Amino acid sequence: MTINIILLGPPGAGKGTQARKLVEDRGLVQLSTGDMLRAARSSGTEMGKRVAEVMDRGQLVTDEIVIGLIREKLSEGGNGFIFDGFPRTLAQADALGQLLEETGMVLDAVVEMQVDDEALVRRITGRYTCGNCGEVYHDDTKPTKVAGVCDVCGSTDLRRRADDNEHSLKTRLLEYYKKTSPLIGYYYAKGKLAPVDGLADMDRVSDQIAAVLPLSREIATGT
């Protein structure tokens, strides 16, 4: 059975981490708008040329183009899809709902990763990654065993995102609350919203997400 979900939550809530785990554990396809736009731009397709033209002019890609890219991905089939970073607005949510209806697909759940803003700031400002293998670390909760050296690959190329600072994060949070948080009420009214504690440890968050997915319920009931 296919499973289609949206991961909803502010920047740094852990959506990417949980999406990767769902890809590994369930074979779902992660639809990240940023990844799709970059892939389309270099694809040479008609849609890719449209994306390149808009981005080269320094303009924002329209909802119509993003929906077109998602439509192409949905046509490839699979075990299901994770919408990560889309929708961001009510208009996009309406457009996605119409697309799913047209393609005969169902949205199973919208997982809202709830966080405390101050705790989120502490989480994000302390994180850094290995530029070689991508392993993620944190000053307080997961420092490297040897200072300046990646535990996994031994690289000394440890990086912090330029915008992982308190001022930038609060600006991003404000943008999220202005544009994206209305989706919480939107999907609650549709009976799709499933809140989880986004600040719990990674495995606990994964367990909470698994508990709301249809496949988990089928396994539990033996149907």
Image (cartoon, rainbow, N blue to C red):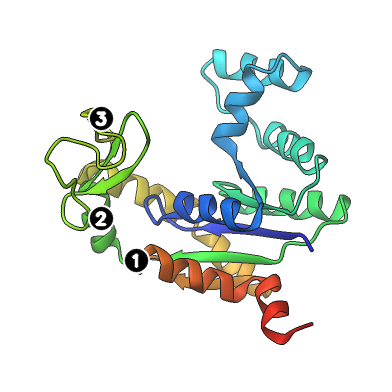
Q: Earlier in the sequence, mark 2 or mark 1?
A: 2
Q: Which residue is mark 2?
A: 123
Find out whether the residues at labels 2 and 1 contact each other: C-beta distance under 8 Å. yes
Mark 1 residue type: Leu
Q: Which mark is residue 70?
A: none
Disc 3 to disc 2, C-alpha distance: 23 Å
Q: Residue at x 59, y 38 (%)?
A: 33
Q: Which mark is residue 199?
A: 1
The N terminus is located in which quarter? Answer: bottom right
Q: Residue at x 57, y 33 (%)?
A: 35
Q: Is residue 34 left or right of residue 28?
A: left
Residue 121 is situated, as x and y percent measured from the top left of the image, at 24, 54
* Res. 190 in view: no
Q: Nearer the viewer, mark 3 or mark 2?
A: 3
Residue 24 is situated, as x and y percent measured from the top left of the image, at 57, 52
**Rendering quarter of residue 6:** bottom right
Does 216 sit above or below residue 46? below
* Res. 196 in view: yes
Dot 2 surroundings within 10 Å: few (below 14), some, or many (20 or more)?
some
Q: Which residue is mark 3?
A: 155
**Front one among 51 and 113:** 113
Q: Residue at x 78, y 35 (%)?
A: 72
Q: Earlier in the sequence, mark 1 or mark 3?
A: 3
Disc 1 to disc 3, C-alpha distance: 28 Å
